[in-house]
């Protein structure tokens, strides 16, 4: 339920998302929340809310409008291993003061979410259903045509009513963010500290007021620690992270950096985590498309029309696998060659950013010596618990470095490398060649859930995973590319 104070505040300048102050009339609020006032608690029901608040707290950092100074803020997030959600008004992209499409690809490539925020940022409650639907749906389809998966929305000016909520749902959005229904520094004093997960009404998720120039570091930290006292979801909304732009919806880069540094440390308490809106809502995410490939292939055996051309080149530019120098200036990638367990260790170690590590002087594996190729990387993999080898009995452990890696084991490696995230596999297998008793059943389904590998649709329309098929080097490039977009290294 909405409160009258919120309606009042929405009419004032402090809450509206004024993206272009040179045209203030464009953003005049006219009391447009009547529809919202008609909503009752009953109308919002239909999704079960836990009787007790969740023990964990999820913080989502959201950024509205696509302002260009959000690019530097994103780099601050990246430096701390955090991700956020960027709600984009599509007609502003590429215009002065706003992000470009290339910026959006860079942001998404770091694991951030791109969300919808209409085409021109109108007050949707003042439009006809047809016009509102066009604003909402066309914004989404434009972002999708640019290659982004778009599932979540934010209302311009937080202005919505029952009709607009239906429009948002009909455009295919799973959620939409409101503002001002969670305890805020200067308002909503009797409001809860956090939204529930799942939200009572995903089409108006509850969030505090927008962060504006009056907010202090203490205000930001208090919202997080208050949310931790009850658990739940805290969605913070930023507009400008800059100096000297919009005088109201701006915080300084210094304040932002200080807060993000504090928040990143806060996630070490084991109960608070920072997630995109899609992650907070448990949505499956599809990795964004790879960056543009080089004009010509550096590998003589990977032509530019090769299915995984872009992913293989990404892998090479990251230094994860640079292929073979065949002499005479010819380089090959050997895309169809299976990946052996020793090379996989090296790939995963490099994918993790080649962290500092000293391998043991004496090999813990009977089939390895310190002179074995990739000895360091194999031992790193073992100490991470990603692949611990085989217990051959009598206290003897082996790693079997020259054995090919099958797809089931690849699923397990990536699941463990991602930190073994909480995930419940479906009771019935979606794959005809995998049952719940199949080794790594959970990990295989997790890999499909993240869309790192979704298996094959066979000629008879059944879906298979081919768990005991060896992973070829071309497919491995694709897996690693997708993994990196979902779980970018710090
Ligand atoms: Zn906005």
Image (spheres, rainbow, N blue to C red):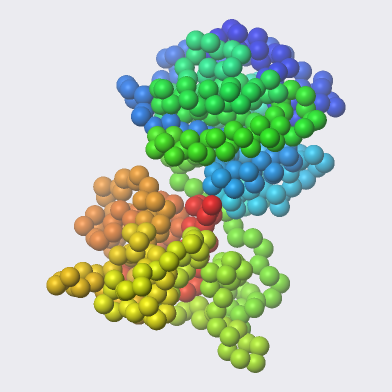
368 and 9: which is toward the camera: 368
The single residue placed furthest to the bottom in the displayed view is 328
Residue 132 located left or right of residue 482: right
Asked if residue 349 is positioned above or below residue 218 in the image, the reply reads below
Q: Quadrant of residue 158?
A: top right
- Give the image location of residue 282, x and y in percent: 43, 40
Asked if residue 314 is positioned above or below residue 403 in the image, the reply reads above
For the point 85% across and 27% down, which residue is it?
A: 22
For the point 67% across and 63% down, which residue is it?
A: 292
Residue 43 located left or right of residue 460: right
For the point 36% across and 51% down, which residue is it?
A: 420
For the point 37% across and 56% down, which residue is it?
A: 416
The single residue placed furthest to the right in the displayed view is 22
> What number of labels is visible?
0
Q: Quadrant of residue 43?
A: top left
Residue 240 located left or right of residue 260: right
Is residue 289 in sight in this rendering?
A: yes
The single residue placed furthest to the front in the displayed view is 361
- Give the image location of residue 275, x and y in percent: 50, 39
- Give the image location of residue 355, x and y in percent: 49, 61
Q: Quadrant of residue 56?
A: top left
Asked if residue 144 is positioned above or below residue 327 in the image, the reply reads above
The single residue placed furthest to the top in the displayed view is 4
Is residue 39 in sight in this rendering?
A: no
- Give the image location of residue 164, x and y in percent: 60, 24
Residue 404 located left or right of residue 312: left
461 and 137: which is toward the camera: 137
């Amino acid at each position: 339920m909405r409160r009258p104070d919120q309606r009042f505040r929405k009419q004032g300048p402090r809450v509206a998302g004024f993206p272009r102050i040179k045209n203030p009339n464009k953003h005049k609020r006219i009391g447009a929340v009547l529809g919202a006032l008609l909503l009752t608690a009953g109308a919002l029901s239909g999704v079960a809310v836990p009787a007790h608040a969740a023990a964990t707290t999820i913080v989502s950092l959201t950024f509205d409008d696509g302002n260009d100074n959000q690019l530097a803020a994103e780099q601050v997030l990246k430096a701390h291993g955090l991700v956020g959600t960027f709600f984009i008004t599509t007609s502003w992209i590429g215009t002065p003061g706003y992000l470009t499409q290339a910026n959006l690809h860079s942001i998404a490539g770091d694991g951030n979410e791109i969300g919808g925020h209409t085409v021109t940022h109108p007050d949707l409650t003042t439009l006809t259903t047809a016009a509102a639907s066009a604003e909402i749906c066309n914004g989404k389809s434009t972002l999708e045509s640019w290659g982004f998966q778009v599932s979540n929305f934010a209302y311009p000016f937080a202005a919505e009513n029952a009709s607009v909520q239906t429009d948002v749902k009909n455009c295919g959005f799973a959620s939409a963010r409101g503002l001002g229904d969670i305890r805020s520094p200067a308002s909503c004093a009797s409001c809860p500290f956090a939204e529930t997960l799942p939200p009572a009404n995903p089409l108006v998720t509850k969030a505090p007021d927008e962060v504006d120039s009056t907010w202090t570091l203490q205000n930001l930290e208090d919202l997080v620690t208050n949310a931790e006292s009850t658990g739940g979801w805290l969605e913070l909304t930023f507009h400008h992270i800059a100096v000297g732009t919009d005088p109201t919806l701006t915080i300084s880069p210094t304040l932002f950096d200080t807060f993000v540094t504090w928040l990143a440390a806060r996630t070490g308490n084991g109960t608070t985590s920072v997630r995109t809106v899609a992650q907070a809502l448990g949505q499956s995410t599809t990795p964004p498309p790879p960056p543009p490939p080089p004009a010509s292939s550096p590998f003589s055996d990977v032509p530019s029309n090769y299915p995984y051309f872009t992913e293989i080149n990404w892998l090479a530019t990251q230094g994860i696998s640079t292929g073979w120098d065949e002499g005479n200036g010819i380089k090959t990638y050997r895309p169809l060659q299976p990946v052996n367990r020793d090379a996989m260790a090296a790939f995963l170690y490099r994918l993790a950013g080649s962290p500092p590590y000293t391998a043991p002087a004496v090999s813990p594996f009977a089939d390895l010596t310190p002179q074995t190729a990739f000895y360091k990387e194999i031992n790193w993999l073992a100490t991470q618990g990603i692949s611990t080898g085989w217990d051959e009995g009598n206290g003897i452990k082996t790693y079997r470095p020259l054995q090919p890696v099958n797809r089931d084991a690849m699923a397990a490696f990536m699941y463990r490398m991602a930190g073994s995230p909480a995930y419940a596999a479906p009771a019935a297998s979606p794959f005809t060649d995998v049952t719940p008793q199949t080794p790594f059943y959970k990990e295989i389904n997790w890999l499909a859930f993240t869309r790192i590998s979704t298996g094959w649709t066979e000629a008879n329309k059944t879906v298979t995973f081919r768990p005991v098929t060896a992973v070829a080097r071309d497919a491995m490039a694709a897996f690693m590319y997708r993994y990196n977009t979902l779980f970018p290294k710090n």
